[in-house]
Image (cartoon, grey):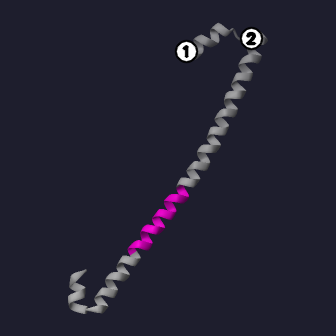
Amino acid sequence: MGWARTLLLGDVGNRLDISDVEQDLELLRSRLRHSSDRDESQDSQLEQLEYEHEELKLVVAALIRHLTRKGIVDEADLRLLAEG
């Protein structure tokens, strides 16, 4: 209510306004904490996905080397497949 509370209720109105502002601040702080927690969780998930991605790249590279050494897959065919 702002100025109307002050006019009608004086100091009590001011205190009510301050209380409203304090509640709004606490709500904003809570949302900020929740957002920060979510960001940390997402960062952790991204880190795990990046690790898994690197592991998969190593496995695929090893598999390709193995298959080409055994003569099961031709390097030219792999290039065509990768470009494809």
Residue in the image at 55% along x and 59% along y: 37
Residue in the image at 61% along x and 49% along y: 44
Q: Which mark is residue 52?
A: none
Viewer-closest of 31 and 10:
10
Residue in the image at 64% along x and 7% along y: 76
Determine contact: label 2, label 1, CB under 8 Å. no
Please say if 3 is above or below 42. Answer: below
Residue in the image at 59% along x and 44% along y: 46
Magenta region includes residue 62: no
Magenta region includes residue 28: yes
Residue, disc 2: 72
In the figure, residue 59 lies in which quadrant? top right
Residue, disc 1: 83
Q: Which of marks 1 and 2 precedes in the sequence?
A: 2
Q: Label 2 sits on what residue type?
A: Ile
Residue 79 on image: x %, y %: 61, 12
Element type at marker 2?
Answer: loop
Please say if 16 is above or below 42. Answer: below
Report the side of 12 relative to 78 (left or right): left
Viewer-closest of 52 and 33:
33
Which residues are the magenta region?
A: 24-38
Report the side of 16 relative to 43 (left or right): left
Report the side of 40 relative to 26 (left or right): right
In the figure, residue 20 lies in which quadrant? bottom left
Q: Label 1 sits on what residue type?
A: Glu
Residue 9 on image: x %, y %: 25, 92
Mark 2 nearby-residue class (10 Å; few <14, some 14–19, many ≥20): few
Element type at marker 1?
Answer: helix
Residue 70 on image: x %, y %: 79, 11
Residue 60 on image: x %, y %: 69, 24
In the figure, residue 47 lies in which quadrant? top right
